[in-house]
Image (cartoon, grey):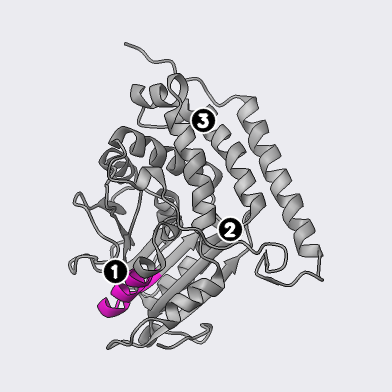
Amino acid sequence: MMVHRPSLDRRAVLHYSVFVLVYRRTNRFAQLDENVPREGYYSRTELPMRRIHFIELHDQPWCPSTIRDGVTDALQFGFHLFQVYGPIVPLLQRLIDSTGTCSIVDMCSGGGGPWLDLSRRLQSHKLPRNTPPLQICLTDKYPNLAAFQKIEAASSGRISLSPQSVDATNVPRELKGLRTMFTSFHHFSPDMARAILQNAVDSGEGIAIFEAPRRAPFTMALVFPWILILSILTLWIRPFRWSRLLWTYLVPITPLVLVFDGVVSCLRTYRPSELRDLVQQLTASDYQYQWEIGEDSTGTAPITYLIGYPQACAVTHAAPVSI
């Protein structure tokens, strides 16, 4: 049976153009107000929002795999289509050059994260020319194997997958390399978040965490047009599944879960000051670490990041916080 796959229409492009225009103008006004004290783009006086660690539905063990995979597929599609994490390529490249790593272990990969695009733009400059290209291994507690396999096949050998469940707080010793997390660190309570960092330190591995959601009213408001755009474009998500159309259009459970989890993600996101508190609570190990925490605002939306790596790999541009 033939399935008709229409091309992207002008309405989808218009929706995204309006989305970007509104976001840029709002952030421009926020930056112009020099009288507002802020950490990055956060104002402590205007945004006194406490972190609320509520549940995200698709993270729960009882969430059906078809719904969970539909959510992670939609997020993966949106991140790839709109190049959400493209602006952090220079930051990530600098980290790869600093550590000299040739392997990356991506944790909580969901539908694959941004690695299909990033893997084409990153390479290890410090390794010999005949060294194999940067290798990325996708892992998750609930692996979306169909999405992982699709990305693996399209990556020209740069990306592999781990079919078993991987706990980010206790990564198996055989998975060696720089650890990364994209739009997933907020899923964890402070104790578990600290355990993720401590496990990396105890293993002597670098870790890089990047978060697009932000704990701000405007960001939460943007969840609704963002999910609307993803729902409109569901027909173009691959691999094609009839179940995805069922749970998006006929019984719109996937969009409802995306909206709920999107708002909750914003409420759970850690601010740079809270990330510093987590780092300061880590216990010493055989390795001395350097940490960089802040926001990258070179793209359309600011990206909060936390980077840590053994001090032996440090270079002069880093701002160290030893533990």
Residue depicted at x 51% and y 82%: 318
Q: Which residue is mark 1?
A: 177
Inter-mark Cα distance, 2 to 3 = 24 Å
Inter-mark Cα distance, 1 to 3 = 36 Å
Q: Secondary structure at mark 1?
A: loop
Q: Could you classify mark 1 by the number of other residues whose Cα lies within 10 Å: few (under 14), some (14-19), or many (20 or more)?
A: many
The residue under label 1 is which amino acid type? Gly
In this view, the residue in front, 149 or 221, is 221
**Count of labels in the image:** 3
Q: Is residue 22 above or below residue 241?
A: below
Which quadrant holds residue 243? top left
Which quadrant holds residue 223? top right
Q: Could you classify mark 2 by the number of other residues whose Cα lies within 10 Å: few (under 14), some (14-19), or many (20 or more)?
A: many
Residue depicted at x 19% and y 69%: 173
Q: Position of residue 101 (x, y in %)?
A: 33, 72
The residue under label 3 is which amino acid type? Ser
Q: Which residue is mark 3?
A: 231
Magenta stretch: dominant secondary structure: helix
Q: Which residue is mark 2?
A: 215
Q: Secondary structure at mark 3?
A: helix
Q: Position of residue 297 (x, y in %)?
A: 63, 63
> Closer to the N terminus: mark 2 or mark 3?
2
Range of the magenta residues? 194-207
Q: Secondary structure at mark 2?
A: loop
> Closer to the N terminus: mark 1 or mark 3?
1
Q: Visible in this render: residue 61?
A: yes
* Quarter of the rendering occupied by the C terminus: bottom left
* Quarter of the rendering occupied by the N terminus: top left
